[in-house]
Amino acid sequence: MVGSLLAGLMAVQAMAQESSTLSPYSQYGLGVLADQSLSTARGMGGLAYGMRNGRQINMQNPASYSAVDSLTMIFDVGFSTRISNFKEGGKSVNAKTGSLDYAVASFRLLKHVGMSAGIVPFSTIGYDYESRDKSTSTTELYTGDGGFSQVFLGLGWEFAKGFSLGFNMSYFWGDYEKAVGVQNDDGTVNIMSRTYSTSISNWKLDLGAQWHQQLNANNELTIGATASVGHKLHATAEVKTLTTNTLTGVTLSPAATTVENAFSLPWMFGVGATWVNKKSLTLGADYSLQRWGALDYPVYDSRGNYSLLNNYYRDRHKVTAGGEWIPNPMGRKYYHQMRFRLGASYATPYYKIKGSDGPSEFSLTAGLGLPISRSMVNISGQWIRSAASGYITENAFRINVGITFNERWFAKWKVE
């Protein structure tokens, strides 16, 4: 079963790797980082570490898999469309993108042991813009495409009442190609172009823990913690420079430079808690730290050297708060079972731009869960603002649509 499940998830690999951003900020580092939250959590701003529900998948804390309902197979697939506005110096540009974001499945493997598998994005790269230099009468052209994803298999085990541990083991892969070209303002020929590229294929390990306690008849508390193992990705970064003589029209052979072991994944830590009252109201908060500041990144400097720089990244901090309200979990009318969600998050940048901090990110989210038999359609709208002093301000509105299927695969039927 596990082999066929992974094969089916890999079938959506190409769609999941399509770029879901047109942000010029995606040219830095490994691109725009995905929040990796699934449809339910997205309506609450990405709340995850303390979330524990037997009819929903929470891959951001694999310890939660141990809560999966023993009679069901859960599938969760998510889509999104994003409308962005970029402003700088009184000018404004709009862009629209859409993508299949993830496909994840989960089921009870053994008593107190749940399993999950799926494909989720890690980061995306996609941009195409130009910048004019009046002092040299030239225009610089910037383009880039790519991204990184992970296919994972995870287990969650409740080893003692209220205490669970879990892990996700992932195959991490992806590539990018970024190009910088310089052309004369009269639109003649490129006088220089430089292409940066890499391809990565490695592993990723995420760990999780949860403590769940029924405080009294009406209140539950779950505290969760996560950690992702940082390590080198053993990938090579390459830059090729192509120069054209504008007088003779002769194009010189490209000069290539490589940097070995150019990329790494950082150690990442998270902690969070959720409180549930009467199975109706859920409130929670998360904090995460990504230790990017300890890593190097390949940079091409003004002297023509392509080498690792140790002051390119910075540690990324993120806080999230959110909640969900179900009008009447035991009610029989349709609106009694609907889910109403709100959330907000703030994250600091994980890279620098010419020595200054990159854009911080603030978002607000509102979501709705619509039950259909045993399944759920989750819809959320998210406003995201990315801004850095002296650089482009990006305002985006993203619509997320996710469908969670709960199928009764493991029920035993009695014949009389």
Image (cartoon, rainbow, N blue to C red):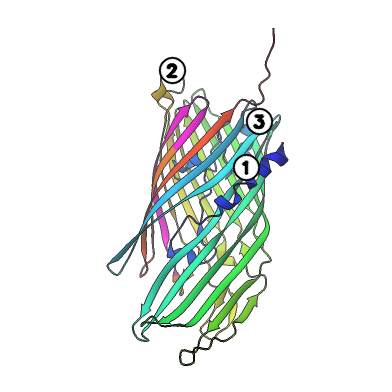
In front: mark 2 or mark 1? 2
Q: Is residue 106 above or below residue 330?
A: below
Q: Residue at x 37, y 68 (%)?
A: 391
Magenta span: predominant SS is strand
Secondary structure found at label 1 = helix
Q: Can the viewer see residue 55 in this picture? A: no
Label drawn at residue 161? 3
Residue 360 lies in the magenta stretch: yes
Q: Residue at x 68, y 13 (%)?
A: 414
Q: Residue furthest bottom?
A: 247
Q: Can the viewer see residue 49 in this picture? A: yes
Q: Amino acid at mark 3?
A: Lys
In whole angstroms, how far apart are the C-alphas of marks 2 and 1? 32 Å
Give the residue number, with chain letter if any, for mark 1.
Answer: 62
Q: Which residues are magenta?
A: 357-378
Q: Amino acid at mark 2?
A: Arg
Q: Is residue 140 above or below residue 270?
A: below
The reply, left or right, for residue 281 in relation to residue 271 is: left
In whole angstroms, how far apart are the C-alphas of marks 3 and 2? 32 Å
Q: Residue furthest top?
A: 416
Q: Earlier in the sequence, mark 2 or mark 1?
A: 1
Q: Nearer the viewer, residue 248 or 215?
A: 248
